Image (cartoon, grey):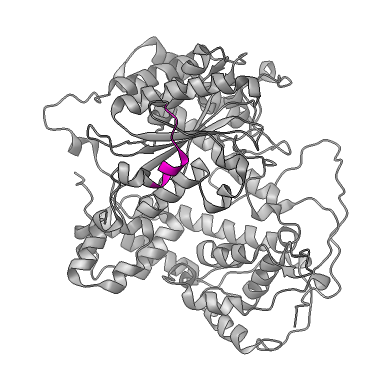
Amino acid sequence: MAVPFDEEDWELGKLGRFSDADERLVRRVMGPWLLKPRRSRLSQNPQGSSTRPKLTERQAQVLMSRGNTVALGINYTPRRQAIVKAGFCPKSRRGAINQILYVTRCRPQDLKDPQYKAMPIWDGFGQPVPHEDILSIAEKWDLPCDDDNLSKKARTHLERGEMDAFHALSGRERLWNILTWHFILSIEENDDELFQQFRVAVRKTVDAAFTAEGRPSIWAIHGDDTEHLHAHIIVKAKSDFGGRIHSNIRGDYLHYLRETFAGNLRSVGLNYEATRRVDRKSLRDEIMAGQAFLHDEQKPWREDDGVGDIYAKLPIWPQIYGPVAMESLERIEAMRRAVKIATQQLSGLEKVSRAAELLKEYLEQVPTQSSWWGRFLPRQKKKNVSDNLTKSEWDLLQHLERMYHDPRQALENFRLLASDGAFRDEEGKKVYPNRGLAVWTLHHRPELLGLTKAGAYQINEIGQLKLLLKQVRLWSLERLPMLEQNDNTFAEAIWRSKAEKDRTGALGELNILHSRIQKVWPGARLDRSIAEALRQAERIQIDNRMPPSEVSDREENSPANAVMRKPVSSASDGGGGGIKPLERPHQPSTQNTRKITRPKNPRGIER
């Protein structure tokens, strides 16, 4: 029987099994789920208690609502969808204050604009809040200081005098409780005539969901710079009556807010409803056929072109080094699958220890580098590794040798990523907007820059690396390669991978919903209806296409409004070794498909 996770017991128990560097390796490659043993449901229920899970009235209402939506099989609906999303939830007092200033537009840069200064702000009772009172919100809400909100791990390091380990903790690891929650309520239109109706609906939602439970809040409506009218709400996590907001991984709390908001919108005359994307039959069929995404990439309060991956938007880097990145991503994904299979029978410290051993073994193996992407890279005569490198670049290369199997390629990859999108400002000064992205990538996603070793994920501090990276010479604007318009295969592969994961995710969410309803209301008609929806989704995934009766042009008022640049035709890889090449749809292409022109001086860098 699994026992509840205790950080102090974990630190003491791992001594002699694996180091902090091995723990970082497992956390960054496999994810944090492998570090903590999962709690058994039996350990949470006393002996002799009923096996039927105990649900609150709110959770039962959400289950019934979602089950009815799936059972009815709604294809299209005249109502538009009410959108509720959660933003960043800070644990630090300074972070909470900055978030309040952003929502109320009381930052110094906002106060310079008279339009922002005059924006109205309301509290949980719907009363206006003067701008001069915003700075005192933290004191009125009695938000604790960071020293009073330390995590158990941070307190242990302080008690033992381990200051280096204490300062090595990230901000969220060092702190314990979330201080404020940030929710965004949005509708799919923006009109001055709708402002008052929208404001009343938001006020009713804030009153029912937060004020009635003793949670102080402030909120403001933003709509002057977007096509979607939306409200930002900052809520104190701890209620004055006791208890905190708990938004579980199943999303029941967010769905409750979404239904409350949609009901209040209808009460003021706005025809909106609240349903999850996976619960809408027409959209679920498109997700299972690989024609839509499970989560909408386009945020309702921010204009976007629908492309969620920032690397895919770059004009040069994806075409030259995109194949290298895809090969490395496939290699890491194959390792994850192998480690999951090898450690599925283990648990706790033994599981993490075995995972660390396997990852180090797999990552240190010299890969057989494929040559299919070599035609994209410039060919040059072999030179000494130190040729054309400055002293700082040579020191950086020594760091990269511990991180990559081909450090010279990783350095050139970093240079191009940092130089991509460079331009001159109004004063003629060179600007490299993606330099920070390249530094972040080297630390957080090193696999995008080349075939990695275990050392790429075991770095604790990047301070010394940052100093060396600042001195790296980037490509000059005149020598950046000018590539002809071509299909972005890297972006297509990323989208293909996401669509494949979303198909599995949609099926998994339906299975979880079916399992929960089956345990609460066994043998009910609702249970059989969701089981039928599951069988239909599985058939679409196997056939890789929608049923003939479902293939139709999407109506404008359809809730299935996911944006897809190109139709994705993907099949399940059946447990294969990575992401399959993208299959082109059999239809005339309107894009220019000329080959990439190799730059004359591809390694030209600014002296």
- Name the spot of residue 59 as percent of width and height, x first: 33, 24
272 is higher (above) or lower (below) than 93: above
Decide if residue 318 is in sight here.
yes
207 is higher (above) or lower (below) than 149: above
Residue located 40% across and 23% down the image: 514
Residue 380 found in image quarter:
bottom right
Horizontal placement of 332 versus 208: left or right?
A: right
Q: Which of the image's four quarters has the N terminus? A: top left
Horizontal placement of 370 versus 534: left or right?
A: right
Residue 569 found in image quarter:
top right
Q: Is 142 or 492 nearer to us in this picture? A: 142
Residue located 42% across and 14% down the image: 528
Is residue 30 magenta-colored? no
Residue located 74% across and 65% down the image: 422
Q: How many labels does the image show?
A: 0
Residue stretch in magenta: 127-135
Horizontal placement of 361 versus 367: left or right?
A: left
- Name the spot of residue 589 as percent of width and height, x first: 85, 40
* Residue that lies at the very extreme toward the left in this rendered image: 48
Decide if residue 572 is in sight here.
no
Q: Which of the image's four quarters has the C terminus? A: bottom right
Q: Is 289 or 259 nearer to us in this picture? A: 259
- Name the spot of residue 332 as percent of width and height, x first: 53, 59
- Name the spot of residue 537 as percent of width and height, x first: 54, 25
* Residue that lies at the very extreme toward the top in this rendered image: 525
